[in-house]
């Protein structure tokens, strides 16, 4: 089975976003089923990243894609947040305090199997992308990885996360 996750990331301009007009509040029942003309629900992303600057960069990169991203600071918090709801995607840093990304992924995969819960795509979010490291991520249960750019890309070149479309192909 294979699916694609595409988050369009248009070039950011310094123009303010238009604010939608206020609408009257609707009862919760009004949101129970989507109509064919309704816009799709925002992608729900859980991002585990301990470094505040990296969290801010990720937030800015995902902001134009109109996704709902919840940030946690370590693997233990990621497992706890995963238990609370279904996520469309988990972006998991590898090296974090308390519990690293590999241990958190193993815990999530074990609970998915035990509970019969749907498999959540988990992407390693790391600057460590050598072949043996990628194999370690896959062995822990991660579906793929997204490389963190270590340096500013040279003119005419793109880093993994600053492309106009943030795309990954996941295979199970």
Image (spheres, helix red, strand yellow):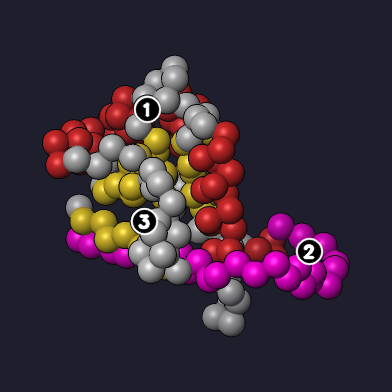
Measuring 51% from the left and 40% from the top, which residue is drawn there? 54
Residue that label 1 marks: 95
**Distance between mark 2 and mark 1 Cα atoms:** 43 Å
Crowding at mark 1 (Cα within 10 Å: few <14, some 14-19, many 20+): some
Q: Comparing marks 1 and 3, which lies closer to the viewer?
A: 3
Measuring 45% from the left and 59% from the top, which residue is drawn there? 162
Residue 81 shown in magenta: no
**Distance between mark 1 and mark 3 Cα atoms:** 19 Å
**Distance between mark 2 and mark 3 Cα atoms:** 40 Å
Q: Comparing marks 2 and 3, which lies closer to the viewer?
A: 3
Residue 50 in the image, given as x and y percentages of width and height: 50, 30
Residue 103 in the image, given as x and y percentages of width and height: 31, 25
Tag 1 and tag 3, C-beta contact below 8 Å: no
Earlier sequence position, callout 2 versus callout 3: 2
- Report the side of 33 relative to 172 (left or right): right
Residue 2 shown in magenta: yes
- Residue found farthest to the top: 98
Earlier sequence position, callout 2 versus callout 1: 2
Quarter residue 32 falls in:
bottom right
- Report the side of 121 relative to 19 (left or right): left
- Report the side of 54 relative to 126 (left or right): right
Residue that label 2 marks: 26
Quarter residue 67 falls in:
bottom right
> Does the magenta stretch mainly form a helix, a strand or a loop?
loop
Earlier sequence position, callout 1 versus callout 3: 1
Whether 47 is drawn above or below 114: the answer is below
Whether 162 is drawn above or below 138: the answer is below
Magenta region: which residues?
A: 1-28
Q: Comparing marks 2 and 1, which lies closer to the viewer?
A: 1
Measuring 71% from the left and 57% from the top, which residue is drawn there? 28
Residue that label 3 marks: 160
């Amino acid at each position: 089975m294979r699916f694609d996750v595409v988050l369009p990331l248009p070039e950011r301009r310094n123009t303010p976003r238009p604010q939608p007009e206020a609408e009257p509040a609707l009862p919760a029942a009004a949101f129970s089923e989507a109509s064919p003309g309704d816009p799709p629900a925002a992608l729900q992303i859980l991002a585990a990243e301990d470094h505040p600057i990296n969290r801010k960069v990720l937030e800015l990169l995902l902001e134009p894609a109109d996704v709902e991203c919840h940030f946690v600071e370590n693997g233990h918090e990621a497992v706890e947040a995963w238990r609370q709801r279904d996520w469309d995607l988990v972006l998991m840093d590898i090296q974090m305090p308390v519990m690293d990304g590999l241990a958190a992924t193993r815990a999530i995969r074990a609970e998915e199997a035990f509970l019969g819960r749907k498999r959540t795509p988990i992407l390693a979010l790391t600057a460590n992308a050598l072949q043996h490291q990628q194999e370690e991520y896959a062995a822990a249960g991660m579906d793929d990885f997204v490389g963190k750019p270590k340096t500013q890309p040279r003119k005419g070149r793109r880093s993994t996360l600053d492309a106009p479309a943030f795309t990954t192909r996941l295979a199970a």
